[in-house]
Amino acid sequence: MKVRLIRKEEYKSYFISPLIYGPLLGLIIYLVALVDNEFSMSVGKSFVLGIAFAFGLQLFGFIIMEMFVRGNQIKKLQTENFKILDQYGIYLMDDLVFRGKYKGFWIHIFPNEEVVKKRKKLYFVINSYYDYPDYLNDKDSKWDFDKANCNKYEVGTINFGGNAVANVPNDKYNPDFKSSIDFLISKLQELELKPLDFKIWEDNYIRPIKEKQEKEEQKRTKQIFKIGNIIDIKYKSRTHNNL
């Protein structure tokens, strides 16, 4: 499966930001202009300049991150070590996470970075998603169940919680994917846990967090424009009085 180098849907994450932080930068430029009488500028022009500068920085960041850094990461994740995952129907996706279904369970393998002896190294965590047995029907019993089954096994450390299980292999830098995945699925079946669709899990746990973050960003943006309008009104009023 071919992984795209440049993702069109990422344009939004890079180029919406200047519309949020650009006005803030424009506000700073405008305040500096108020202090320096020789450097006069309207709020509108200040905001346009701030947005343009922020946009330029984001464009530079987009080229570096999406073309160079991302390209290097893709190469690392397409070496021979990862070919075994194809046999499990688990493939590298555009977000650089390995995803697929194996024996009914969603499997996600997340590459993460950590600094070891001043060098960045990739390590891997294998996730799956489950629904509890019918006899566990309240939060306390589910919590106790998850806690009781978090343990270190011969293939790695397995942690349960929030309808998700994470397996951190013993050799997390160069894991034996076959043994780790087989053991994880075997453990889920042994505990009589049922496969949970990732979409349902995401709606229950991830979507509420994203919606909250989006609302906070919208609130900050409105506040910035409101402050800008107030300052512009005061500035125009003061200029009119001086005339």
Image: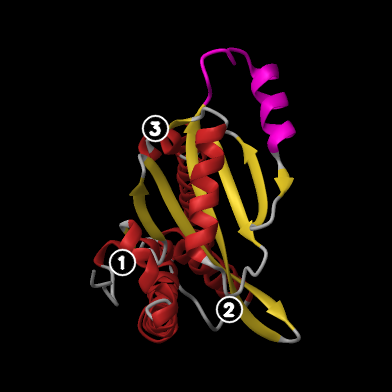
Instruction: Using the image, tell me which numbered label, if any, was put on residue 208.
Output: none
Q: Which residue is mark 2?
A: 37
Range of magenta residues? 132-149
Whether residue 191 sits left or right of residue 145 in the image: it is left
Vertical arrangement, residue 27 with respect to residue 234, above or below: below
Q: Nearer the viewer, mark 3 or mark 1?
A: 3
* Image x and y of residue 92, in percent: 35, 66
Instruction: Using the image, tell me which numbered label, if any, was put on residue 11.
Output: 1
Vertical arrangement, residue 88 with respect to residue 122, above or below: above
Tag 1, which secondary structure?
helix
* Image x and y of residue 152, in percent: 73, 50
Can I make out residue 109 in this image? yes
Q: For the residue marked with disc 1, what is the amino acid?
A: Tyr
Tag 3, which secondary structure?
helix
Residue at x 45% of width, y 35% of height: 201
* Image x and y of residue 156, in percent: 66, 57
Quarter location, residue 174: bottom right
- Disc count in the image? 3
Q: Nearer the viewer, mark 2 or mark 1?
A: 1
Instruction: Using the image, tell me which numbered label, if any, was put on residue 200.
Output: 3
